[in-house]
Image (cartoon, rainbow, N blue to C red):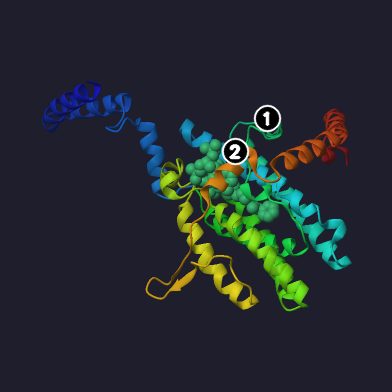
Amino acid sequence: MIQYLRQSRNSCIITAGAFFPFFRSMYTQMVEVLGGQNGETAQERRFQARIDAAETIEAKDWMPEGYRKTLIRQISQHAHSEIVGQLPEANWITRAPTLQRKAILLAKVQDEAGHGLYLYGAAETLGVSRSQLVDDLLAGKAKYSSIFNYPTLTWADMGAIGWLVDGAAIMNQIPLCRCSYGPYARAMIRICKEENFHQRQGFEIMTILSRGTNAQREMAQDALNRWWWPSLMMFGPPDAESPHTEQSKRWKIKLLTNDELRQRFVDQTAPQADYLGLQIPDPALHGNADTGHYKFGQIDWAEFYNVIKGNGPCNRERLRVRKAAHDDGAWVRAAASEYARKREGLPALEQQI
Ligand code: FAQ
């Protein structure tokens, strides 16, 4: 009915507007109030035009509520992934085979904490507090990447995580450096530089193991067997089952779809496995000379949905450890707040000098 009224009113005014400029301006004002044909308001259309023109949206700009909510959801899930993602690797810091390996792994795990902080900071620009986001994570209400719910059983898992998990993360995150929301895009630039180093250190661990003793080669193959399929799941459900992709692409919060990124990852990684002399655990995997892409087998989506519902091998353990770390850090947060409070009472440093 509303649509009918709009159409008949519009056709009437357009005819009159052709003769009288006054009617035309009145018509424009009406559209501002009534919204576009697909129910978008004029403000929303102007916003979409900015996105289409590749303008960057900043925190103080007007944005549709759905855009804000989608960003908060995605950025906070991403931040949680970085923080929870520290746990599987931290498990190996004390057991790294050499002092050098320990130092590298420690630096990597610290980098992940930094990534979490940049991302919580980017989410805060959208009007949500970090403590609220962290509470949601600890209460089990917020998602984080499925990949971090798998156990790290051997040292080769540190290689497989760097090579595959960081490799998948970079594949997904490089396009995000050009996403429409400025604070997120800028955080991603720095994160991607560090992820690149993470991926290389993982590939180097796999190279050393795959050229080592039989036992080391077997350990590397076993890690690849366990991490391959979960790494493909990191990109999210198939496009046909992804409720958010279409709108997120329109808003340029996502630049490529889940399936497009997954395909790029397989195309990049399969030759790397050949170089290592390791076998990707997928009998259906083969290069297709006509398309220039690798075809790969069926992903077990039932496993993916089970993991994101909280029933993966380590979901409960990850949240328990994260919560314990948060509780143990309460005195640090209290001390930092007290320090900040005391400093607020002091004149700025420049004035003191
Ligand atoms: N795990 O409609 P879509 C890293 C959820 S960082 C869990 O396709 P969307 C660094 C999704 O949230 C890794 N949940 O959703 C590192 C949604 O649930 P909701 C994290 C998943 O948002 C390395 C529902 O399924 N990276 O690894 C997953 O358009 C090593 C429907 O899905 C990012 O977060 C999943 N894998 O696309 C750290 C990158 N996939 O909210 C330590 C930014 C989907 O409706 C060590 N995020 N879901 O309840 C993104 O690009 C997107 O959010 C996707 C999902 C692609 C992850």
**Does the CB distance between marks 1 and 2 fall below 8 Å?**
no
In-front residue for pair 57/17: 57
Mark 1 beta carbon near ligand 1 (under 8 Å): no
Residue 163 appears in the picture as rendered: no
Q: Which mark is residue 309?
A: 2
The image quarter in which residue 141 lies: top right
Residue 114 horizontal/vertical position (percent): 73, 49
Identify which residue, 321 or 214, lies in the foreground: 214
Q: Which mark, by number, is residue 78?
A: none
Helix, strand or loop at label 2? It is helix
Residue at 52% over, 67% down:
283
Residue 107 in the image: above or below residue 126: below
Q: Is residue 80 left or right of residue 171?
A: right
Q: Earlier in the sequence, mark 1 or mark 2?
A: 1
Q: Disc 1 designates what residue?
A: 132
Q: Which residue is located at x 60 percent, y 38 percent?
A: 309
Indicate the amino acid at tag 2: Lys
